[in-house]
Structure formats: structure tokens, C-alpha cells
Amino acid sequence: MNRFLCHLRSIFSQSPCDRETPDFGLRTSDSDGRERRSAFTLIELIAVMGIIIALSLVVAGGYSGMARAMAEGQSTRQLRDSLLLARQNACVNGSRTYVYILSEDEYVICRKIGTSSGASSGQASYQSGKDPLFKKDAYVFYDFYTDLASFVNDVDRTSESAGQASGNSNSNYRNSDLSSSMLLFDLSSDEAQYGILRGVESNTDLGFGWCLYWRTANGESHNSRYFAEGHDYGIALYPVRSLPKGYIFLSEVGSCVYFEPTGMTGPGPGKHTFVVAEAAYRTDTSRQRDVTVDHSGKVTVEAPK
């Protein structure tokens, strides 16, 4: 090191280094005048390491608490935003819009499309090469009064090609070409009953109305009560949403709130409350948060009790 500093000095001063560069190490002198180097003792090093570890624990604890507070705020903020989005959709589209709890930590926004005029008790008839593929292994219900043409146009981009692919050029056949994320809901059931919408077809037998083909979701068995006569039905407007990891609904699965085109809520004139809590502390009321929707459509988040 001394030689390196001496070399730098000689370059900038353009003169040879005639004396040794000062040593910046720690030095002490013995009683007899001999010079020796000193260093930190083991106890001093351990003390410094202890201080560093203590500060690290303080910082880590603060970060953990901050992360938990952020997750807690996000759990209710996201649900509140979804409720406001559902209300906005109801007002803009002029159609009743629902927010359903599907499971302990999942919920979905869906919109009413129409009302079922009746449903078949079994699977729809299907002849290979003559019928659209979406009819295969599907169930069907009918809507004689709702004009689904605009709805079909919104979700169907390949109706003519689907008819050609199936060997049927009848333009009444509409293949919605929908993905599994297009959930179809029975909105009149006591709890959230849903399947996967596979296709929509104009009712050629009667000359009016529509047939809607669907399949059960997640391998569930078919229930003849689904989409029965007089039941409202609708589709999911967005993919299923989830609460942050570690948070659950304490509200009953299948419970819902809907917004009318006026922005007001139902069912009933009272408040509708969704209770969110950490899964590990579900019985601790001090960790529960309520997201409440009043009859006017106002959404509020209440602090933990």
C-alpha cells in the first residue's frame, strides 16, 4: 500500500519518492518505545455484531407489521373497488349487476342478461357433423322473451366459421367460442349456482327466442333446479377475483348484493355487509373488517371492532 501511494505521489509531483508514505494503520508504543500495531478485540467484535443483529430484528419486525397492514388494507380496498365497479356497470349498462361470494376467498361480478323460460332435464341432443360442437355434452335452457342478438354479437366473433366448421351453414347457429372464464349464473337461486356458457343458438323450432348451452363447472353434477323457468340468469363481467393470501370471507358463501340501474341495492332495503378477516384469526373480532353497502349504494369500510 505504501509503495502504491508513493508511486502515485511520484507521478503527480514528477519527483522520486524520497520518504515513506505515512502508515494509516493503528499504532501504539510500548513502555520501552517499541512501536506495535493494535486491532479490535474479540469482545468488541461480538458487541458490534450484537448491535447489528438487534437493529436488523427491529427493522424486520417493522417491515412485517407494515406488510400485514398493507395486506389488511388491500383486502377491503379491493372489495370496495369491486362493489363500486359493479354499481357503475349497473348504472351505465342499465342492467342489474351482482357481486357474489363464490368461496371463502373468491367473489365475482356478474350482470343479469335475461330470464329463463324453461330448461331441459337432460343433456341437449347432438349429432356429430350436423350440430355445432358446443352442443356436445351440454345442457340447455331457453329464453323466449329476451333479445340476445346484441349479446351474441358482443361475445361471438366466429359464428359463420363455426357453422361452416360443423358442416351446417345455417346462420342461426352461433358459436360463442367462449373460454372457461365465461361463467353463467343462476341469479334466482338461494346461493351462487353457476356453470360455463358454451354457446348460444336462435330457437329455430319456434321461430323466436334463444337456446343457451352450458356445462357444469369443476365437475359438479347437474341439478335440474338450475336455470329453471322464471329464474334470472347472467354472466360474469370479469374473471373471478380473490382476497389477498391469508384473508377470507366470514360472510356466508353464496351471499350477494346487487345494484339496480338506479344505483340502489337489493335484495331488501337494509344494509348488506361483507365481513373480511385473517384466516388465522377468524374468531378474533378485533381483526375483522366490515365492507358495508347501504340501500342508496354507498360503500363504506368500517375499522376493526
Image (cartoon, helix red, strand yellow):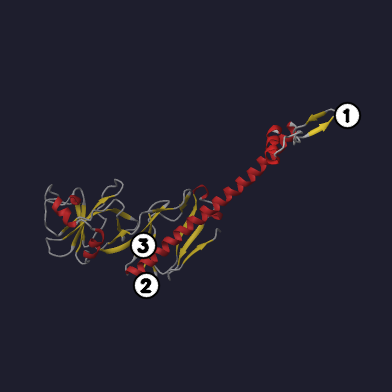
Q: Nearer the viewer, residue 272 or 127?
A: 127
The vertical placement of 232 against 253, above or below, is: below
Q: Nearer the viewer, residue 167 or 229?
A: 167
Q: Nearer the viewer, residue 57 or 114?
A: 57
| CA distance separating discs 2 and 1 | 95 Å
First-in-chain label (2 vs 1): 1
Label 1: state its secondary structure: loop
Q: Could you say which disc has been placed on residue 262 in the image?
A: 2
For label 1, the residue is 31
Residue 277 at x, y percent in the picture: 50, 53
Circle 3: residue type: Tyr
Residue 14 visible in the snapshot: yes
Residue 130 at x, y percent in the picture: 11, 50
Mark nearer the viewer, 2 or 1: 1
Label 2: state its secondary structure: loop
Question: Mark 2 and mark 3 in contact (Cβ < 8 Å)?
Answer: no
For label 3, the residue is 98
Using a 10 Å C-alpha cutoff, classify the residue at mark 1 as few (fewer than 14 neighbours), some (14 to 19) or many (20 or more): few
First-in-chain label (1 vs 3): 1
Q: Which residue extends farthest front? A: 14
Residue 126 at x, y percent in the picture: 14, 49
Circle 1: residue type: Ser
